[in-house]
Amino acid sequence: MPKTLRDLRPVRVIGIGLHPYQRASDTSYVTLGLRAVREALTDAGVAWTDVEAAYNGTALLGMAPTRAMLRHLGATGLPVLQVENASASGSSAVAQASLAVASGVCDVALAMGVDKPGMMNVASAKAGVRDLSGSRILPFTHFALLANEYMRRHGARPEHLAQVAVKNSRNGAHNPYAQRQKARSLEEVLAPPFISGSLTRLQCCPIGEGAAAVIIASDDAIRRLGVPADRAPRILASVTRSERVYEGARNFDAELTRETTAQAYEEAGVGPEDLDLIELHDAFAIEELLYVEAMGLCAEGEGAAMLMKGDTDIGGRCAVSTSGGLLAMGHPIGPTGVGQICEITRQLRGEAGPRQQPDARTGLVHMVGIGAVCVAHVLQL
Amino acid sequence: MSDARAAHPGLYRIDQNPPSLLGQRCAACGRLAFPPNPYGCEGCGAEADELVTEEIPGDGELAAFATVHLHPGKDIETPFTVGTVVLDAGPTVRATLTCATDDGLAIGNRVHTQLVPQQSEDDGELLELRFAVEKS
Ligand SMILES: [Zn+2]
């Protein structure tokens, strides 16, 4: 019988670090990445020489960026691997590092993500299968179409979608690593420019640069290195799936998220009612409503009502995107999924300061990548 | 019109009005798919020689629409409006609508294919397939 992550030995996040997400600048990716890794090592209280393998989520930098960066920490000869899975690249780096530690082939692994804005060279354009829409339906229009369908079906209004960005901007205003650190009013979010359909600029995530890093370790390493276990949440489940043919389904993105998170709950032995917080792929405001429903936090069509009631605010039943999410913290591609793990870890430790979700114990992390793929992790402390 | 060509060769006929879409029926599992591909069936994995070209009438229902204000290409001016269309024959397709804005559009409107000459094309006429909406 195939084993799940939880059937293997426990893996825990012992260190987190970030380079703030920001607009594209002339800072090199090496500077971005090293800052995040050094911060994660310091946070864990371990040395670079303790790290036995490195997985680097990156989609835009080009071939072989990882050793050219990590050698400046001291070239220890550790195995390094680039992990590319579109927007879920960082999440997939976390998945690979978790499996490496859980399997026992190493005790301490680095999962990181680093990217700078560049040419989005999406391979499916070269697959030799053309469609009618081509570049006229980019991701923001894909989600504008889903927003249009959602509003009509469930009687939601553009103000409900905009409220997602209002909430997440409020959270991001307390996050020193966020690209957008300004709380926005409903009027500001609804104001032009319109990008596509009802989506205004502030309902679309900023794509900038940055880096994020987590150190993942076994209990053996935690004892040996003297890491405080009460700051090291366990990764209970790690699930990656890709899109199937959902015959007759209206929304493939929601279906993919539904089956990926359902499997993550099962493997972790938790349900949506156990979650204290979630970091999810809110590249566009509509996605948060689609995904909280697909994740089973509420019934289909009730995502807007749940949001308006404050259930997904910090202090609510299940806080969604305390970091500010992709909408406010930003979406530098490779780092994003790793940055989500940093946020959940910080929250579970109770170290999130003004954006702390009270008594947070269990968190879900979710990313979607174009193509489409979905990666979910469940963390618990 | 003699030198008119399809902007997306192989995806629709240009000698009909309204034009049919060119889909593929899988001889192994019966799935009707659009757009066609030269590789294999996404439903069951049957190889390309099992995929039989099938004309799909260009009639359907508007399931969603969005007016696009930001577009990197020079093939069309903004704003333009795109739609998700559920064809009567089954497949869901997304394409540009003949109307530039969403004025008067409603989900559930009937739509039909229409050939539209693509703008700023100086080397013969390129015909692209769009959907015209019967506004209620
Ligand atoms: Zn088939």
Image (cartoon, rainbow, N blue to C red):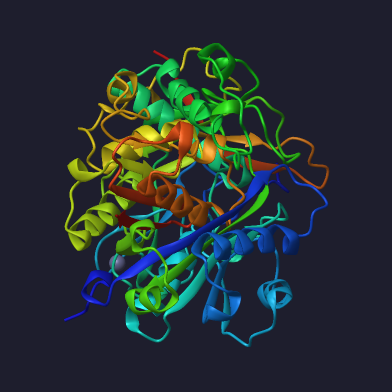
Q: In this view, does A256 lie above or below A150?
A: below
For the N terminus of chain A, which image quadrant?
Answer: bottom left
The foreground one among A110 and A160 is A110
- Would residue B10 be found to the left or right of residue B34 on screen? right
Q: Which residue shows up at 45% across the image and 33% down it? A: A355
Which quarter of the picture shows residue A208?
top right
The foreground one among A232 and B127 is A232
* Residue B83 appears in view: no
- Would residue A221 be found to the left or right of residue A127 on screen? left
Which quarter of the picture shows residue A352?
top left
The foreground one among B11 and A193 is A193
Task: Tell me where residue B78 appears, x and y as whole percent.
Answer: 69, 27
- Would residue B123 be found to the left or right of residue A16 on screen? right
Task: Tell me where residue B10 appears, x and y as whole percent.
Answer: 55, 57
Task: Tell me where residue A248 appears, x and y as whole percent.
Answer: 26, 46
Q: In which quarter of the image is ligand 1?
A: bottom left
